Amino acid sequence: MSEQPLRRLGVLGSGKGSNFVAIAEACARRELPAEIALVVSDVPDAAILERARERGVPARYIPPGRFRTKLDEEAEAAYVAAMREARVDLVVLAGFMRILKSEFLSAFPDRVVNIHPALLPSFPGLEAWKQALDYGVKVTGVTVHLVDAGVDTGPILAQAAVPVLDSDTPASLHERIQEVEHRLYPEAIRSLLAGGITFKGRRALRLG
Ligand code: GAR
């Protein structure tokens, strides 16, 4: 059992929430010295909200505003306010399909993490498993990284490889990638909170 105080995680997601579930279960098993303080989605009927509520985790839909790929200014301020009210130590993106801009990122400097379904810097952006299959790589994988102002460009915290099989379809490859995500994401967050991850020799996170 860890001696660390429980850290508060704020999760943002747009989809089915399987990574949220993996993180919540790691918290419940005390493998991750953290609790999920709030889940926010930009999609009103996203399954992640239901997955959170059935576990007793506060869950809110916050309208994203008028853009398709990012939050508008008012929405971004509302997302920051929600995370601050929930007193989160770390913001965890779990299938959140919008780009966060500087207002959000400067409110949580070096405290926003993302999971991406490829070995960055290969295949940033959407449907990375499909990009990998279309390109014909033999190995792809999963990356956990800090979020910066670029698209899938922030400091890499953890990676794991997934072989591409000749028989793979986009769906079968994404399914195997997700199995790896569910193991890697809680583990990377655990190491990050413990101060055990460095990027180019610099400690990736310092919590007070
Ligand atoms: C995950 O595969 C995650 O890597 C991907 O969305 C899926 C969300 O699944 N994220 C991205 O592609 C971000 N660029 P989930 O809702 O079941 O956790």
Image (tube, rainbow, N blue to C red):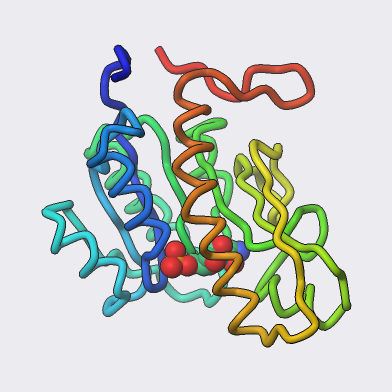
Near-viewer residue (20 or 43)? 20
Q: In this view of the protein, can residue 97 be seen by the observer?
A: no
Q: The N terminus is located in which quarter?
A: top left
85 on left or right of 100: left
Near-viewer residue (16 or 85)? 16
Horizontal and vertical percent for residue 28? 23, 41
Q: The C terminus is located in which quarter?
A: top left
Near-viewer residue (17 or 206)? 17
Horizontal and vertical percent for residue 153? 74, 49
Total marks in image: 0
Horizontal and vertical percent for residue 184? 54, 46
Q: In this view of the protein, can residue 196 be seen by the observer?
A: yes
Residue drawn where x is 53% and y is 37% of the image: 188
Residue drawn where x is 37% and y is 45% of the image: 80
Res. 55 image quadrant:
bottom left
185 over 19 or under it: above or below: above
Horizontal and vertical percent for residue 176? 59, 69
Residue drawn where x is 34% and y is 65% of the image: 41
Res. 151 image quadrant:
bottom right
2 over 120 or under it: above or below: above
Residue drawn where x is 76% and y is 17% of the image: 201
131 over 117 or under it: above or below: below
183 on left or right of 134: left
